[in-house]
Image (cartoon, rainbow, N blue to C red):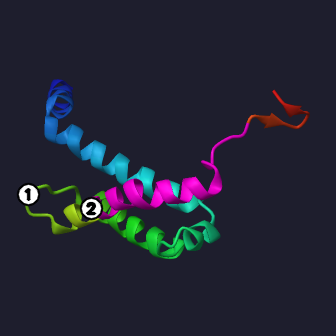
Amino acid sequence: MVGVLQILAFSYLNPIWWATIAILAYKLFALVDAAVRREDAYRAADKKTKGFWIAILAVSFGWDFLFGVNFFTGIGTLAGLVASIVYVVDVRPAIRALTGGGGRSNTGPYGSW
């Protein structure tokens, strides 16, 4: 039991472990965000199609989830991270500008509140 706790404590104290979790979370965020956006918003923003972005982001996340995040020799990890950054920094703001943010509105079933 002590050995398992030592391994877990080492994992939580290891900055590479935290970077791995952060990269996976960032890629998952980009994938989920791309999946919930409307298809026509991608065309209206003059960006690639929704299917293109979902495919790229899904392969990127899946690669790292299945084979592990590899910072030093993993071209797949770096390429996927670049694709996720491009989506979040370029595509997402363009789509949000056209769709009004895509978040919750302040209107309920009985009007504004």
Most extreme residue toward the right, as rendered?
110
Whether 42 is drawn above or below 71: the answer is below
* Residue matched to label 2: 82
Q: Position of residue 45 (x, y in %)?
A: 54, 67
Whether residue 92 appears in magenta in the rendering, the answer is yes
Mark 1 is on which residue type?
Phe
Task: Identify the disc placed on residue 72.
Answer: 1
Task: Give the residue displayed 8% in from the left and 57% down from the top.
Answer: 72
Q: Secondary structure at mark 2?
A: helix
Query: Going by the image, does 65 lie left or right of 75?
Result: right
Mark 2 is on which residue type?
Val
Q: Dot 2: within a 10 Å radius of its alpha carbon, few (fewer than 14), some, or many (20 or more) residues?
A: some
- Quarter of the figure that contains the N terminus: top left
Query: Going by the image, does 2 lie left or right of 40?
Result: left
Instruction: Give the extent of the magenta segment.
Output: 81-105
Q: Position of residue 90 (x, y in %)?
A: 40, 59
Task: Give the residue displayed 38% in from the left and 54% down from the top.
Answer: 89
Whether residue 21 appears in magenta in the rendering, the answer is no
Q: Dot 1: within a 10 Å radius of its alpha carbon, few (fewer than 14), some, or many (20 or more) residues?
A: few
Dividing the picture into quadrants, the one containing residue 31 is bottom left
Task: Identify the disc placed on residue 110.
Answer: none
Closer-to-camera residue (96/29): 96
Q: Of tags 1 and 2, which is closer to the observer?
A: 2
Q: Count every numbered label the image shows and give the total.
A: 2
Task: Give the residue displayed 23% in from the left and 66% down from the top.
Answer: 79
